[in-house]
Amino acid sequence: MFKNKEYNSWVVVVIIILLSYIFMTICILLAALALEVFLIQVSFAMILFSLLLEVFKFVEEVINDILMAIVFGGILLGIGVVLL
């Protein structure tokens, strides 16, 4: 198709450069979208955590043993992390 090999190599270089810019643009857009979703989830989690701290402040102690309270708290925290 191209008789001049120098021209052919320049076309390949230009195509590679354009592809790199297109790829970089797509990656930046996807990263911004992921960051937006992550920020929404983190904001929701912080607000919900603050509200639930205020709600559960008035709940009486169910377990007097500190170790069992830590175990149940860890289980509930793990469930909460999995749900988000």
Image (cartoon, rainbow, N blue to C red):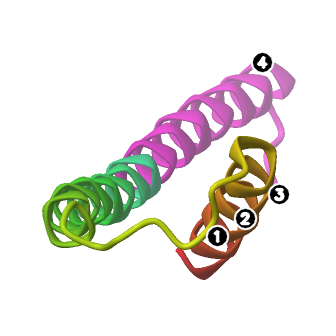
Q: Amino acid at mark 2?
A: Phe
- For mark 2, give the secondary structure: helix
Compare residues 43 and 65 and report the one nearer the observer: 65
Q: Which residue is mark 4?
A: 6
The span from disc 2 to disc 1 (Cα, nearest Å) is: 6 Å
Q: What residue range appears in magenta?
A: 1-29
Q: Residues within 10 Å of mark 1 (few under 14, many from 20)?
A: few
> Measuring 39% from the left and 56% from the top, which residue is drawn there?
38
For the residues carrying marks 1 and 4, which lies nearer the camera in this image? 1
- Comes first in the chain, label 3 or label 2: 3
Residue lying furthest front = 64
Compare residues 46 and 42 and report the one nearer the observer: 46
Q: Which numbered disc covers residue 72?
A: 2
Magenta residue check for 23: yes
Q: Quadrant of residue 77?
A: bottom right
Q: Amino acid at mark 4?
A: Glu
